[in-house]
Image (spheres, rainbow, N blue to C red):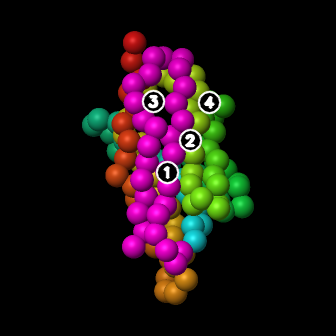
Amino acid sequence: QVHLVESGGGLVQPGGSLRLSCAASGTGFSINNMAWYRQAPGKERELVAVITRGGITNYANSVKGRFTVSRDNAKNTVYLQMNSLKPEDTAVYYCKAVVLPTTGYSFERWGRGTQVTVSS
């Protein structure tokens, strides 16, 4: 079994910063791409940032220049540094990983999400 656990969400004022973490636990696997998604109330889930195992990144236009995604392959952990936060960044943030088991086919795994609220 592979589990993803997000942490680091919370309440922050506009212009502030937060750092989210997502750690994959379990045995007998490695992680390929990892990504952060978010879902605001009444809206569809959207891709925020993605990072390959080799460190290539891509971002949604709405967060470019403000958010930075990184990862530690040894720890099977992905991070999302969020700066200059805006009220429209308020959402539940989800981590997704493409899991490569030592045997069998790859599959996707989602975390349960962490709430980020940007408000004064």
Could one spot residue 105 in this view of the protein?
yes
As helix, strand or loop, the secondary structure at mark 3 comes to helix
Nearer the observer, disc 1 or disc 4?
1
Q: Which of 10/95 is in front?
A: 10
Compare marks 3 and 1 and give the one earlier in the sequence. 1
Q: Residue at x 60, y 59 (%)?
A: 75
Upstream in the sequence, badge 1 or badge 2? 1
Identified at 46% across, 69% down, the residue is 26
The span picked out in magenta is 1-29
Name the residue that disc number 4 marks. Answer: 66
Q: Position of residue 41 (x, y in %)?
A: 29, 35
* Residue, disc 2: 80
The residue under label 3 is: 89
Real-space CA distance between mark 4 and mark 2, rounded to the nearest whole angstrom:
10 Å
CB atoms of marks 1 and 2 within 8 Å = yes
- Mark 1, Cα crowd under 10 Å, few <14 / some 14-19 / many 20+, is many
How many neighbours does mark 4 have within 10 angstroms: few (below 14), some (14-19), or many (20 or more)?
few
Q: Which of label 1 and label 2 is nearer to you? A: 1
**Which amino acid type corresponds to the residue marked 1 in the rendered image?**
Cys
Disc 3 packing (10 Å; few <14; some 14–19; many ≥20): many
Q: Of tags 2 and 3, which is closer to the observer? A: 2
> In the rendered image, which quarter is residue 1 located in?
bottom left
Closest to the camera, between mark 4 and mark 2, is 2
Q: Quadrant of residue 114?
A: top left
Measured Cα–Cα span from mark 3 to mark 4? 11 Å
Residue 83 image point, x, y percent: 58, 27
Earlier-in-chain disc, 3 versus 4: 4
